[in-house]
Amino acid sequence: MLTEFGKLLRIIRINSGDNSKDMAEKLRLSPSYLSAIENGKRNIPIGLERSLCEQYPLSDSDREKLRQAMMDSSEVIKINLTEFGEKKQQLILAITQDDLSEEAVDKLYNLVFKKKREQIQ
């Protein structure tokens, strides 16, 4: 079943004139893995959003739609905590264990995504 994220991937690909193989090469994925992501059979890999933004000219609105579609299309996200320092590990655990107030989550969200928008531009 095509996910919302998969639909956006196809729209981006078609609008850019790329075929599946071209997009897969740009994103450093195999065509079969890209297809599996589009169809919700594989998790969306970490870093795919950044790769899409680097390879395709997306508006701020398109980037936000992409981010939302990623969240809507991902039921489970696996995170290898050993890849992160102690503070990031503690933050990830606090978020996943619902140990943060809504106010703290809002502040953190605004801080992270403000910084992310600045990096993309």
Image (tube, rainbow, N blue to C red):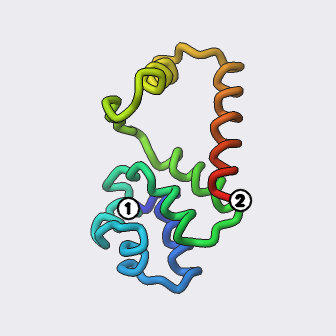
Against 111, residue 33 (above or below) is below
Against 25, residue 18 (above or below) is below
Q: Residues within 10 Å of mark 1 (few under 14, many from 20)?
A: some
- Say what amino acid the circle numbered 1 marks: Asn
So how many labels did they put on this image?
2
- Please tell me which residue lies in front, 54 or 48: 54
Q: Nearer the viewer, mark 2 or mark 1?
A: 2
The percent position of residue 40, horizontal first and vertical second, equals 38, 55
Residue for badge 2: 60
Residue at image position (70%, 42%) is: 114
Q: Quadrant of the N terminus?
A: bottom left
Residue at image position (63%, 46%) is: 116
- Please tell me which residue lies in front, 118 or 27: 118
Q: Residues within 10 Å of mark 2 (few under 14, many from 20)?
A: few
- Please tell me which residue lies in front, 26 or 77: 26
- Say what amino acid the circle numbered 2 marks: Asp
Residue at image position (43%, 83%) is: 19
